Each structure stands twice: as C-alpha cells, then as structure tokens.
Amino acid sequence: MNEEVKKRIKEKLSLVPELPGSYQMKNKDGIIIYVGKAKNLKNRLKSYFTGHVYGKTAMLVNDIFDFEYIVTSSELESLILEITLIKKYDPKYNILLKDDKSYPYIELTDEAYPRLKVVRNVRRKRKKGKLYGPFPNVGAARKTVNIINRVYPLRKCDSMKKDLCLYYHINECLGYCKKEIPKETIDNMKSEIISFLKGNSEIITKKLQEDMEKASMSMNYEKALEIKEMLEDINITLMKQKIDLNHNYNFDLFNCYRHNNYLSVQVFFIREGLLFGRHDDILTVVDDDDEELLQYIVKFYEKGNLLPKEIIVPSMMDCNLLSEYFHLKVSSPSRGQIKKLLDLAKENSKVQLEEKEEKLKQSDEARLKAMEDLNKIFNKEIHTIEAFDNSHLFGTFYVGGLVVFEDFIPDKNKYRKFKIESGVKDDLGAMREVLYRRYYRVLMGEVPKCDLIVIDGGELQVSVARQIIDDFGLDIDILGLKKDDKHRTNTLIDRDGNPIELDRRSNLFLFLTKIQDEVHNYAISYHRNIKSKGMLSSMLDLVDGIGEVRKKDLLRRFGSLKKMREASLEELQEVVGREVALNLKKYLDSM
C-alpha cells in the first residue's frame, strides 16, 4: 500500500460512523476481496490500518486500495448483509471451507413400505422421512445401511416391481410387490431400526449372534464368518462414543483454537446423548476469532448440513445473534457436563493445529515465495490464475477444463467445464473455442478478469491465447507450460513465445506444475465421468449432428448405449440418417 492510498484511506476513516454494519475491502481493480461486519464500523476498520498485522492479514491490508461500508440498524441485519455479500462476491480473503460437500445422513422413508438409504443435501425439499446422522463419512453410512438391510427385509427397489426379485429369494425383502404384509410387521421392523440408529445396538447384535450360532451349528462356516465381521463392524465402526449426557440431548457443538493466522475448528455432533461424529478444519484467517467462527458456522450449514435442535458455542460468541439468524436455541454453558465437552473440543482443536501447523507454515512460506517470484517475472502482482486444458477421444469429441487459483490456492467453486463444438478436430481449435467463450464473458462483464492465463502447451497454444486476448483488448498476461518428449514440463513460454528461465527445483516451478496437473486431471475427468456415470444424454451431445430432437429419437428407439453399440449402422441410420449414423458409430466404437 503506497503513501497516497494510505493518506486517502486515513481521510476516509475519519468519516466512518461508530455504528453497526458491513464493510467491503476492494483492490485496485475495484474487486471486493473481503467482507466483514462489526458492531462499531469505525473501530473495526481502523484496526486494519493501525498496529502490527502479519501473515494473511498483512496480505489483505497490502491488497486494499479502497473500502466501502453499509450501516445497518442492528447486528443481525449486518450479519445477514455480510453473508449475502459473501455469497454474491465470493471474496478471496474470506474463509473457504475445504469442500462444499455436506455430510451423509441415513433416511428411513415414510412410505407404506419403507426403504433405508444414504442421502446428502438433506435441506433440499424432499419426501417426508426420518433422518439420522450426520455420519462422519459416506462409507460408515453405507455400511450401516447394508447391515440393517441384511438383518431386516425392507423394500429395496426405488419403484415397486411387477414381480418378485432376487432380494425376495435371498430373504432380504418380504416381496411387497406381490405379498400382503401386515402393518404390525412393518411397524416392528421400523421400531427396531430406529432404536439401532439412535445408538441401541442390542437388538440387532442379538439377532446376528443367533444367526451366527445357527450358521455355525449347520457347519455353514462361510456365513458364520460373514456375520462375525458384521458384528465387528457394529462394535468398531457403528457404535458411537458414549459420553455421560442425557439421552435427550441433540446438538452440534463448535469450538476453536487459534495461533497466529491459523484457526483450528472442531465440531462435535451429539445425538441422543452420544458423540455421533465429529468434523475438523484448519483455516487461514484475517479477522477476530469470534467473527471467523461465526462465518464458519453459517457456511457450515449453508453448504447443506442439517440444522440441529440446538447449537453450543464458546463464550466469546454472541449466542443471541446466532439464535436470531438460525431461529433455534444457541447457548454457551459456563459449567457442567456440556462445558467440559466444549473444553474437550477446544483441546482437540489445539492438538490438531499443533500437529499440522509446522507443515502448514512451510507450505504457506513456499506459496508466498512462489508468488513473489511470479510477480518478478511479470513485474506486477499476480493473484488470480486461470489455467486451461482440453481432453478428447482419439482426436475427436473434445471437452475443455478451466481451473482457477487465487494466490496459488485452488478455488474449486470457480472451476468450469466446456462442451466443445463437434466440428472441432484439433487441440488448437478446441483451445481457441474455450478461450473465446471464456473471455467474451469477461469482456461483457459477466465474470471478473484474471491476472494470468496458464496454457498447457507451447508456442502455438500461447499464440492462440494471445490472439483471443488481444482481439478483445484485455490486459491479461499469458504463460505457456511446454513439455518435453517425455511429457514432462521443462520450459515456460511468455506471451511472445520466448522461453523463461526457471529453476525446476524452485517453488514457483512446483506450484505451476501443480496447476498444470490439476487442470489436466480436471479435463480428463470430464470424459471419464460422462462415461462411468452413464450420462447418456450428455454423451450424445458430443456427437456431431445430434441435437435435442435426434437425441430423443435415439433414446426412444434404443434406450441405452449398450443397445446402440449392438445396433447395426443401418439401424442407426433409420433414426438419424447415414452421415450422423457414421459419426455415432465411430464414437461408440471409440468408447
């Protein structure tokens, strides 16, 4: 931050009122890089520009060119405004959770013939059913469902079949599609399953032990061993860690521990008085602990995790504010069993951070050194990097991938996939189309401009990127990563096609190749996902000459890719014509 900017900000600070509100920090391009809230805007904003700051906070302050603020009538309004602006602008200095996946739950459907299944995104509008969880990972949830389905012959099919299926014949379904099952039988099963999912494993354990003894007595040792392993899964994986709490307690508990710019967060999920699971994160932060933890808790539930009946937080938090925001009970006990649990969560946070802080510190130092070296090459500050790569099947059916890094940290919310026009038959054509589509949107103001484009390729690929950027009149630097004949990156290429000398052992080289690997794998995974998940409709989109009408005709006639592969050229030709049938046949044979 130069003296002119400091002087202007100092003058502006003198006009800030001592009222609650939300503030937005901006960089030299007018992009919002941080959003916060405060009970007293003047005091909070002054704290950034007075006194000693370090680490990520120092990076933020150095990046600030201007700030704005919006006064609100209450702190709740300022919190709602803060969260709204964070969602809208996704500022790079606000905390970013490690992933945006929600925890899995087990759902016992509320149907005449209930099913048991693993679900995510439980806050979406869905049919009524009882939810149990969250489970620490999807593997534990699926293992639980498998065990229950083995013991209890629940309905297994999503929609009722017309005839008895394999599950009926192996005694894992009562044949609901053909048999009249008494309601009492179903209610008894549901009652025992609910009891198990609430932490009482005695009924299922007893059933399995009886089955194991029967199998052993009849010398069916293979089945006995299988049941023994299921019992071990219950004892080791599925039994929840008991704590001395009332069985009616259901809450999520948050606590944290901070050292320097690292905040370690621990979440305990308490269900029916049991420690059902836990979650941890280590974040690099710039604000006060209470503000960072507040943002974290809001984001934790915004990403799809189910709100509990109550939230427990440390004493530094404003319980009333959180309670108003979530419309549920939020408390911070000062004594008793739950206070001991809060202390345990903080201790776990501290241990977690102490184990990983040195490694995180080394990683951050390497990243900052790489940023410094990159800035020297281009003689300006580089923050946002967009990297591109293409993937294809035997020179046809191209797709493109874009990954975005902020200060060498991946921002996966901004990754993008591109379906490329079927007429494109080479890498340069595919690269040209993807870059044109991306930076036309930048030109139209639909997405922000990055600082650097990284191309997986040499002089020809860089020249294509330069032509697009120059035609649009955008001030964006370009860097090519050229591979040798062993497919290893060995040369950096600038926008004029000139090589850039760089030690292959340097932090910058390692970070750039990490970006290159990321975009390469991302583009390839697009094809793999289309193929492995059976996304028939998306796969047909890649075939030259097939649009919505022909796609529907093919699906109506054949129904699956397998049947399309088995069809003759003449049969395909009857639906889409000879030329398109040839394209489709070529595509199907290449899979």
Image (spheres, rainbow, N blue to C red):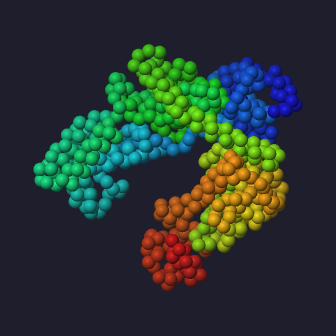
Residue 205 occupies quadrant: top left
Q: Using the image, determine if residue 73 lies above or below residue 108.
A: above
Q: Using the image, determine if residue 224 lies above or below residue 499.
A: above
Residue 579: x, y in percent? 59, 81
Residue 542: x, y in percent? 58, 68
Whether residue 98 can be seen here: yes
Q: Nearer the viewer, residue 385 or 202?
A: 385
Residue 284 occupies quadrant: top right
Residue at the extreme top of the image, as rendered: 335
Q: Using the image, determine if residue 246 lies above or below residue 193.
A: above
Whether residue 180 can be seen here: no
Residue 208: x, y in percent? 21, 44
Q: Residue at x 33, y 26 (%)?
A: 247
Left or right of 132: which side holds 314?
right
Residue 241: x, y in percent? 35, 32
Q: Residue at x 60, y 68 (%)?
A: 392
